[in-house]
């Protein structure tokens, strides 16, 4: 019924498994707070003032009557920058990839820590750990609700059998020609492979069709939660596969997807097995 075969070594060779947490951290403090610090409240963050040679504790470093923020903007214009340098966390991210955002965060973090004299081996180790933690984080983009399903109150054996047959017919109707493991093994062997998108798209298209039909089919009320879990775990996995397509253009997004694939694949297997067992029990009672 499911095409997602697993091979732990494939994914562990691509991404190291680590604990989940939000944002780059140093000690017990989230670096976003430190990076966004503006001591003199002149609109120029402390870490950026260090790049321009201005004093983060004075609004007008050279005392010429023109505040640092104005002078820095003039310097940027002279350097050919049409807009303010928006490298602080959470700013100017509309058109950035996840890799761009992460690179920006890492850059500002390193500059800030260096400015505060906190770059040492322990800090480098902390940042390395945070890199893997950052890769692990991702939020499911689409979540289906019980209200999205077409429920029926009838749960007699005939209705359950009809549901079971319909479920099997969906997976028979949309077979997957190539499994994920073989595709990712090929990627490991040749990271320059540019055919990744063309190989993953057929899987994505087929699984989207499966999810669409799972949502539209009639579901006996007692099986509704198990059916919904099957849909949502399938959705999680297909989002992982979709994000893997960007391996060559947004590596952080792709690596995040790869790091979660095994866990979500196991969750999908579990969801399918629980539903199959519930159907079996209903038919045998």
Image (cartoon, grey):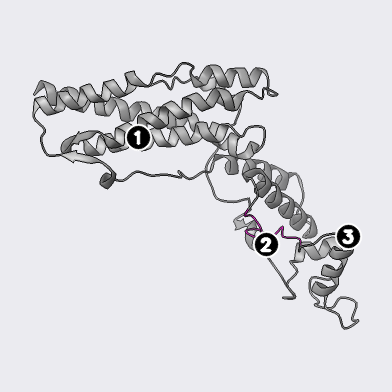
Q: CA distance from mark 3 to mark 2?
A: 27 Å
What main secondary structure does the magenta stretch of the protein show?
Answer: loop
Residue 229 falls left or right of residue 260: left
Q: Residue at x 36, y 33 (%)?
A: 211
Examine the structure image and report whether residue 92 is included in the region drawn in magenta. yes
**Residue 165 lies in magenta, yes or no?**
no
Where does the image place residue 145, in percent across and percent down from the top left? Answer: 31, 46
Residue 21 vertical position relative to residue 250 in the rendered view, above or below: below
- Residue topped by disc 1: 212
Q: Is residue 65 visible?
A: yes
* Residue 158 x %, y %: 10, 25
> Which comes before the other along the chain, label 1 or label 2?
2
Q: Judge the density around disc 2: few (<14), some (14-19), many (≥20) Cα neighbours within 10 Å.
A: some
User: In the image, which residues are magenta?
Assistant: 85-94
Distance from label 3 to label 1 (Cα)?
52 Å
Q: Which mark is residue 34?
A: 2
1 vs 2, front mark: 1
Q: Are marks 3 and 1 in contact (CB under 8 Å)?
A: no
- Most foreground residue, 144 or 7: 144
Give the farthest residue toward the bottom: 65
């Amino acid at each position: 019924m499911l095409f997602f075969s697993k091979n732990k070594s494939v994914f562990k060779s691509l991404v190291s498994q680590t604990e989940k947490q939000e944002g780059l951290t140093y000690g017990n403090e989230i670096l976003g707070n430190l990076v966004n610090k503006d001591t003199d409240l002149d609109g120029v963050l402390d870490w950026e003032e260090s790049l321009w040679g201005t004093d983060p504790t004075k609004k007008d470093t050279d005392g010429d009557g023109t505040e640092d923020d104005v002078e820095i903007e003039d310097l940027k214009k002279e350097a050919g920058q049409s807009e303010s340098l928006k490298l602080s966390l959470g700013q100017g991210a509309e058109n950035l990839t996840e890799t761009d955002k992460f690179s920006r965060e890492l850059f500002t973090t390193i500059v800030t820590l260096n400015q505060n004299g906190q770059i040492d081996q322990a800090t480098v180790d902390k940042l390395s750990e945070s890199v893997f933690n950052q890769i692990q984080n991702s939020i499911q983009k689409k979540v289906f609700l019980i209200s999205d399903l077409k429920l029926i109150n009838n749960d007699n054996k005939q209705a359950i059998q009809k549901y079971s047959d319909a479920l099997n017919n969906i997976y028979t109707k949309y077979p997957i020609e190539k499994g994920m493991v073989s595709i990712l093994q090929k990627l490991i062997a040749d990271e320059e492979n540019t055919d990744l998108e063309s190989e993953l798209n057929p899987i994505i298209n087929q699984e989207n069709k499966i999810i669409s039909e799972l949502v539209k089919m009639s579901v006996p009320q007692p099986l509704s939660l198990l059916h919904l879990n099957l849909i949502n775990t399938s959705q999680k996995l297909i989002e992982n596969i979709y994000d893997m397509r960007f391996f060559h253009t947004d590596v952080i997004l792709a690596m995040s997807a790869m790091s979660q694939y095994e866990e979500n694949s196991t969750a999908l297997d579990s969801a399918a097995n629980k539903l199959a067992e519930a159907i079996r029990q209903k038919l045998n009672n």
